[in-house]
Amino acid sequence: MKDVFGTPQSLLILGGTSDIALATARRLIARRTRTVWLAGRPSPDLEKAATHLRGLGADTHTITFDALDPASHEMALGKIFAEGDVDMVLLAFGMLGDQARDERDPVAAVRVAQTNYTGAVSAGLVCARALQAQGHGSLVVLSSVAAERARRSDFIYGSAKAGLDTFTQGLGDALHGTGVHVMVVRPGFVRTRMTADHPATLLATTPEAVATAIELGLRRRSETVWVPGAMRLVMTALRHVPRPLYRRLPL
């Protein structure tokens, strides 16, 4: 169960090598989180992440999870919830893809969509049902400001995140009153390993800043978190820019 400050004692991360997720885990472990499950494809990076969190004092486990294999999600994630209550699920997996390449390769484009959207729908529903059955917990989903309006530079990725964002909002409405808290996190450009080859954009942020915002959102039981907070105003303005002008913006 969460402590009086809203800090989860147990944490399940879907996408166990995510820089944002690991920054969040470190921050929560420094508070009261004691058990962490890292779900992801078996890899040296996943084991390295687990070893790192164990060194911080958390009882950390790894479990095989593949976003592109929805048929396996119920069994894989069910094993975790069978071990005991999970206070927080952080859905943090995803892929940027390569917009120019993916436009020429529909199969690659579909892989981006399946990873960022359909895999998340499956895993999100499995976890939501388990959280509802135990009567408490938070489901935190990493969306993106890219979900707010299509951009020429990343509309394949952005369209998948838009679907995920809408799905998560609807799931939150469906679970209202059940004791399960659902929170959408919309970061701007985050400097991570995944974005290392991409130029930083306006109001770029860091995994640590996102982690801080997630913790604050948990305490407040927020439904939507923008990182940095100013991105909310930026995207509100961009949503109302006429399309002919919007096409000319360096986005």
Image (cartoon, rainbow, N blue to C red):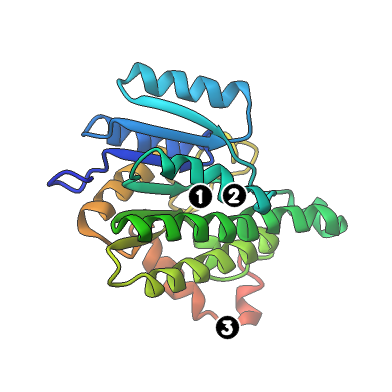
Residue 217 in sight from this viewpoint = yes
Residue at the disc numbered 1? 189
Question: Is 89 positioned to the left or the right of 4 in the image?
Answer: right
Gap between marks 1 and 3 measured at Cα = 23 Å
Residue 250 in sight from this viewpoint = no
Work out whether mark 2 precedes mark 1 in sequence or the reverse, and give the earlier one: 2
Residue at the disc numbered 3? 242
Identify which residue is drawn at 44% across, 34% down: 37
Specify few, some or many for label 3: CA neighbours under 10 Å numbering under 14, 14-19, or 20 or more: few
Identify which residue is drawn at 15% across, 46% down: 5
Q: Tell me where residue 213 appears, x and y as whole percent.
A: 31, 49
Q: Nearer the viewer, mark 2 or mark 1?
A: 2
Gap between marks 3 and 2 measured at Cα = 42 Å
Q: Tell me where residue 135 appears, x and y as whole percent.
A: 29, 59
Relative to 237, is 78 above or below?
above
Residue at the disc numbered 2? 73
The kind of residue on which mark 3 rests is Pro
Residue most toward the right? 104
Q: Which of 159 and 206 is in front in this view?
A: 159
Evaluate if marks 3 and 2 touch, with contact meaning CB atoms under 8 Å apart: no
Residue 251: name its quadrant: bottom right
Gap between marks 2 and 1 measured at Cα = 29 Å
Work out whether mark 1 precedes mark 3 in sequence or the reverse, and give the earlier one: 1
Tell me the element at label 1. Answer: loop
Question: Is 133 positioned to the left or the right of 76 in the image?
Answer: left
